[in-house]
Image: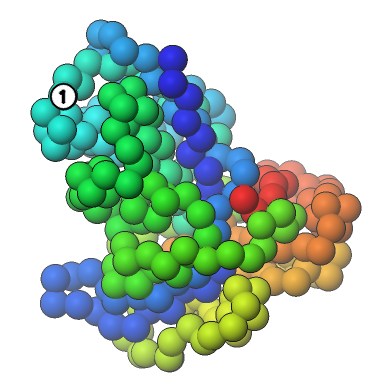
Amino acid sequence: MITEKAPAKINLALHVRARRADGYHEIETLFAFLTDGDEIRLTPGPIRFDIEGPFAAGLASEDGNLVTRAIRIFSQEFQLSGEVSVVLQKNLPIASGIGGGSADAAATLRALAGLHGIPLDDRRLVACAEALGSDVPACLLGRSAMGTGRGERLQPLDGLSGTPVLLVNPGVAVSTATVFGAWDRVDRGPIGDGALLDRARGGRNDLEAPARAAAPVIGEVLGRLTQHADPILVRMSGSGATCFALYRTAQERSAAAAEIRASQSDWWCLESTLA
């Protein structure tokens, strides 16, 4: 069995610069990965795909799933057998702005590459990731970076590794297509230079306004995160509805999580660390 982590991804900043003729958006984003997330378990053998975990019920074991699409694209690209058994441990909420499906697809590609002895920097593997979606190349890289273009042009960055982070989702799924479609098409400028934290603090998430219009509870989540334990950065991730806060210490993160869980027991909270 090959086991691959599919860690959650957060956007420290997300600037939407333009809508492209191909229907995608030109973006600039700073992103980082957590030490926690979903998990892929792959075994050679008869084709089978199962989903387990707390958010398994929201997904279907069918061809439209990014995991099965990753298997199919990998098999076609490398002309290898796609006969594998895969179990997806779904620990992250669905349609939540933290790259869950993309991370699952990238972890599947890494597992298949490991099974067949293919280096992770093989250009064909990157091509598979690009074919699966704008976020999948970033998840295949799996480290903090600056993303441009659709998000697939990557510049690895250092900084913030080991930083305590708290993720909070109010149990509302937000459509990425709907949020991007509601962007007001105003270019508010690029991400600045400097250290990663300084760049993140000086940035913004241009999708927050349309996401809050679709799910006003996002504003409440951001407010709650701002109120507790003096975080160093609070922001919505991706197209929402998950929001996050970065802290100086794990004790501050745990104190904030305890306060939020006590007042909003139906919200999903994840205490983790930046990788």
Q: Nearer the viewer, residue 53 or 248?
A: 248
> Which of the image's four quarters has the N terminus?
top left
Q: Is residue 73 above or below residue 271?
A: above
- 242 on left or right of 102: right
Residue at disc 1, secondary structure = loop
User: What's the residue at 53%, 43% (across, down)?
Assistant: 7
Residue 236's x, y, as percent? 56, 66
User: What's the residue at 28%, 9% (across, down)?
Assistant: 45
Residue 141's x, y, as percent? 42, 51
Q: Residues within 10 Å of mark 1 (few under 14, many from 20)?
A: few
Q: Is residue 191 visible?
A: yes
User: What's the residue at 25%, 8% (across, down)?
Assistant: 46
User: What's the residue at 37%, 35% (across, down)?
Assistant: 110
Q: Amino acid type of disc 1?
A: Leu
Tell me the residue that label 1 is attached to. Answer: 80
Residue lying farthest top? 46
Figure coloring: rainbow
- 75 on left or right of 112: left
Residue 257's x, y, as percent? 79, 51
> How many marks on residues?
1
Q: Is residue 105 above or below residue 263?
A: above
Q: Is residue 61 visible?
A: no
- 200 on left or right of 181: right
